[in-house]
Amino acid sequence: MAVSLDQKRIALETFLQDHTNIKYVTPAAPEFSSLKATYNLTITATPLAIVRPQSSNDVAALVSYCTTHGIQFSVRSGGNNLYGASCVQDALMVDMRDIAFVDIDKEKSSARVGGGILQGKLAKELSKEGLVTAMGSLGFVGFIGWGCYGGYGSLSAKYGLGVDNILAAKVVNWNGEIVDADEEMMKGIRGAGGAFGVIVELTVKVYPLKSILAGMIVFDSQDITSVYQSYNAGYQTLLDEGLSPALSSQQMVVNSPNGRAFAVGIIWSSDDHDAGRAELAKIEALGTVVMNTVGPTTVADYMDILSTQIPSSAYGACQTLSIRKLNNETTAIMSRNFEKMPSSFGTAFTIHELRGPSAAPKSNSVFGLREPHFMLEFISTVAKEEDEKESREWATNFRKELLQMKPENLLPGTYISLTPPGVTPLSKIYGPDSNYETLLELKQKYDPHNVFNLAVPKFYEQ
């Protein structure tokens, strides 16, 4: 006989009476809506309930209970998956955000971090010791989800991607046991994240870095076609000549209060600010600068600034495509589509660049895109729900037009964190070099009963 949702909640509440450390919220509670809210406001699913474990033992008890009683569960680290992966209709949401410790080793070469740590808190704790690790730009994003599925970021040219900085992991496995991931599982975690268990702790590399140069350079965008093409012709020359790995530049086209603008986000990840200003001058020379906010700061403080400028929730989603070169054909297509870009706040386009230590094959990770490339992000996460359709159609058509360019400039895989579930086969996302076959073998070995079937990536869709 089928068990109703109310019966499941009653049984769960009885179980939790013996685990008083675990916080528990049902859909009837006034705080439920705010606790379940994820980045994507389009997601309307209602979980069975929300539980907030306080320790690895709590997570282990929850996994054991769910598997024994046939309860589907999802895991939330930050809740910023663009497709609402952590918020699933009638599934128990295991919210990890209270497990947010940071423990730096005595040598200050690594740190253990909790499975629910947000990037902003991690940056602040490391900054107190004059340290950084590879991370993204927004403080409200969960570090585990960002890092384990790839982790493009403004420090990657110098320190590598998020996956390249993961040294070890503690996981609750399908049987509800707390285990230290062995090397085989670590290979899968570095690229496929929580597909093999609930990650309750990561050990990551950390690096000495007290201050950076960071900010935004906005170029005259009245004639965005010529400005964009000219900038990228010059930028390609800089790449050919050799840019310092300490310099990160992220191109973006956004809707500002003054209209559409082409800007470049800059981070110089070295304490040698004189050398940074010399490199920065090369970027400034690529166009007519109308605003420049680049100045001395820390990773933590800059993350705080960016987090106040980007909404922590929005309607819509993003799409992605990876290419090898920003050549004339590509930038011509891009600039045409910038002219068509809707004026809605949140509609945007940005480019993440992979160069340096991460742009080489790695045998200890299933992450697939291991050559120098540009990951394009077509952003249709808008502030107003009524703007979502127009923004999404623009992003979709933009991406389709780029797919028609010469195939040698297109990479077959996409970035899983920005890819709608089921749209791009996992064999393309994780290929080449047998990564996909390795991933299937690891899934069968470490999650033989597909207990973590709601985790990313979703193997049942293949």
Image: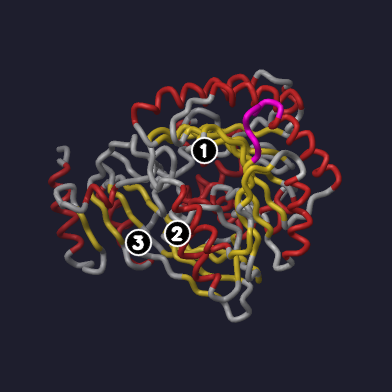
Q: Residues within 10 Å of mark 3 (few under 14, many from 20)?
A: many
Upstream in sequence: badge 1 or badge 3: 3
Upstream in sequence: badge 1 or badge 2: 2
Kindly report which numbered mark, 1 or 3, lies closer to the viewer in this rendering.
Answer: 1
- Relative to the observer, which residue lies in front, 401 or 1? 401
In the picture of the structure, the residue carrying the numbered disc 3 is: 59
Residue 333: percent from the left, percent from the top?
A: 66, 22
Residue 358 shown in magenta = no
Q: Which residues are magenta?
A: 219-226
In which quadrant will I find the N terminus?
top left
Residue 108: percent from the left, percent from the top?
A: 61, 76
Identify which amino acid the numbered label 1 is placed on.
Answer: Leu
Q: Which numbered circle lies on residue 118?
A: 2
Q: Residue furthest right?
A: 241
Residue 426 lies, with reference to residue 449, above or below; the image says: above
Determine whether the residue tagged by mark 2 lies in a helix, strand or loop.
loop
Q: Is residue 426 left or right of residue 5?
A: right
Q: CA distance from mark 2 to mark 3?
A: 18 Å
How many labels sit on residues? 3
Upstream in sequence: badge 2 or badge 3: 3
Q: Is residue 261 left or right of residue 457?
A: right
Determine whether the residue tagged by mark 3 lies in a helix, strand or loop.
helix
2 and 3 marks in contact (CB < 8 Å): no
Residue 183 lies, with reference to residue 248, above or below; the image says: below
Residue 267: percent from the left, percent from the top?
A: 65, 55
In the picture of the structure, the residue carrying the numbered disc 1 is: 418
